[in-house]
Amino acid sequence: MRIDILTVLPEMIEGFFDCSIMARAKKKGLAEIVIHNIRDYTTDKHHRTDDYPFGGCAGMVMKIEPIDNLITKLKSERHYDEVIFTTPDGEQWNQKMANTMSMCENLIILCGHFKGIDYRIREHLITKEVSIGDYVLTGGELAAAVMADSLVRIIPGVISDEQSALSDSFQDNLLAPPVYTRPAEYKGWRVPDVLLSGHEAKIRDWEFQQSLERTKRLRPDLLEGDGI
């Protein structure tokens, strides 16, 4: 998978992709993350990528020209499955969407900034608009990093124990069950006996029941319509 991230502040996220699972995915050749500075594609002599909005409202708006120049260049080099814009009013990012999009070959993620982007970009260049939550960030760079991480980690081969990724929260619309490690007892706080029993079927049933109970208590919205 290749992910091209378009931003006016590449330094915000460059280090993120050189650590942990993301770094391993790149080293294995399973993921390629390319960060582009939108300022490099403007004809403005001061490399400005924003301007005042028509209509006189407050804030600044990202200009159409440099973004169009960059996206056009990238599309001339390869086919992209989606051109994604990170925006608070986009479709909510979730595990189901990550699972689906992890099968894509090439993605562009445009990081929003300032008051927003010239709406013509959204009308003519963007294929998918995504939000990571109902709040506003300074820019879309953090959202792009979150999305890329959730995509790359479920690509087969990225995590050595693939069952670990498959048992994460939200994979089956359930939260993950509690997890424990050694020592089995600490300050009188004991690990549940079933996890020490070695009985695989009982352990799996306990984990499912714990996931179901935690989901009903903490995120009942995940179970709506599932008949569980």
Image (cartoon, rainbow, N blue to C red):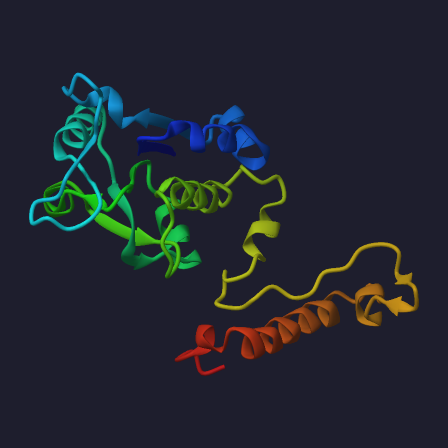
Residue 54: quadrant of the picture? top left
Q: Residue at x 25, y 42 (%)?
A: 82
Residue 118: quadrant of the picture? top left
**Is residue 217 depicted above or below 57 in this figure?**
below
Q: Residue at x 67, y 69 (%)?
A: 207
Query: Which residue is outermost to the bottom?
Result: 227
| 177, 228: nearer the viewer | 177
Residue 36: quadrant of the picture? top left
Instruction: Judge from the rendering whether residue 218 lies leftward or rightward of residue 209; answer left or right.
Output: left
Instruction: Judge from the rendering whether residue 190 lies leftward or rightward of residue 97; answer left or right.
Output: right
Which image quadrant: the N terminus? top left
Q: Residue 6: x, y in percent?
A: 30, 32
Q: Residue at x 43, y 44 (%)?
A: 151
Q: Residue 212: x, y in percent?
A: 58, 75
Q: Residue 136: x, y in percent?
A: 36, 54
**Is residue 165 depicted above or below 205 in this figure?**
above
Instruction: Judge from the rendering whether residue 130 lies leftward or rightward of residue 125; answer left or right.
Output: right
| 213, 189: nearer the viewer | 189
